[in-house]
Amino acid sequence: MDDGRAPACAEPGMAVPPPVPCSIERGKLDVLMLSYEFPPLGGGGSRVVHGLARELASLGHRIDIVTMAFKGLPRHDVQDGVVVHRVPCMRWKEHVCTIPEAGSYLPVALLKARELARRLAVPLEIVAYDTVAAMVDAAPTGAWDIAFLGIDPARADAIGFSPPYLEIEATYLVPAGSSLHAAADVDREGVRVAAPARANYELFLGRSLARAQLVRAPTAEAAFQLLVGGEVDALAGLRQALSGLLDALPGSRMLDGRFMAVQQAIGVPRGRDAARTYLGRFVEEAKASGLVARAIAATGARGVSVAPAAG
């Protein structure tokens, strides 16, 4: 945020306009609304949120709503004067949403970005990407100032990382009837594992799998479809994300144990050493104060824990 550009929040979408400055003297406000459903998704609750947002916008207030993405919907649009931002999630049906799906739409990164923006007294703009790989590739262009993503050596040439603030368990999802029972069982001859290309855990598996075959897919959804179609034996992923897929593939289950813990951190484009030092202090304070723990509790995420204090 050192030069006024926007922070990035891992995964899909497009950059959105900066907020219109709020003037208390004019009586106009900048209002951010969070709702896991907004038209055309959802039912009655969705329409209530839409109606409230529309009325506030008609009074001249700037209204932004952060809601769930869904196939076929734009990542950013304007409805009745309301600026809509759709963020990545694990939603599979237009009018039905499970509790894990609802919790997946607003990651811990948003809570942390909001707190950081408050401390720096700067506007917060979310710049989302279709894949983490696209976000990493954009680092040298100056499209974003800070990003929330997993630490990995393959990303170190482009991004400088803070100490980790979260550790997220990564394991496997297998279909009904699978002979695999634990994460440690997967690395054997004849086992095919799907993962989205350049995800943190895919990079790790590319270095660590000795016998199993790693099948890379362009997106997380494409990797899941490989499992649904029987083209692979297991799907690698973060535990809380995989839990949202259980209903989408009846009889599927997550394996016991984990193959890694993704260390989630705040990244800055390589060369911004002062920003990285500041963020390192911010992360350690956030862990010590309980901010990170409260954010985890608010999302109800599974398989997520506060990272240990930096040594």
Image (tube, helix red, strand yellow):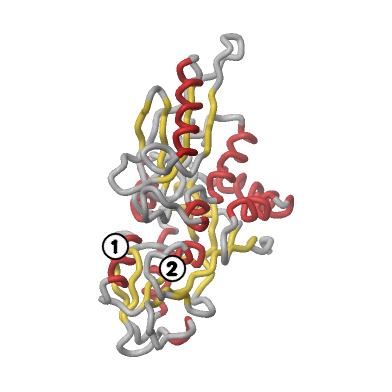
Q: Which element carries disc 1, helix, strand or loop?
A: helix
Q: Which residue is mark 1?
A: 222
The image shows residue 267 at horizontal and vertical percentages of 50, 50
The image shows residue 117 at horizontal and vertical percentages of 58, 36
User: In the figure, 147 relative to 260: above or below?
Assistant: above
Q: Nearer the viewer, residue 232 or 3?
A: 232
Residue drawn 35% across the image and 61% down it: 220
Amino acid at dot 2: Leu
The mark found on residue 135 in the picture is none
**Residue 274 appears in which quarter of the rendering?**
top right
Q: Residue furthest right?
A: 289
Amino acid at dot 1: Ala
Q: Is residue 181 left or right of residue 304?
A: left
Residue drawn 35% across the image and 68% down it: 195
Residue drawn 28% across the image and 60% down it: 218
For the residues labelled 2 and 1, the Cα–Cα distance comes to 16 Å
User: In the figure, 10 relative to 244: above or below?
Assistant: above
Q: Is residue 309 left or right of residue 49?
A: right
Q: Which element carries disc 2, helix, strand or loop?
A: loop
The image shows residue 263 at horizontal and vertical percentages of 54, 63
Residue drawn 38% across the image and 52% down it: 136
| Mark before the other along the chain sequence, 2 or 1 | 1
Q: Which residue is mark 2?
A: 246
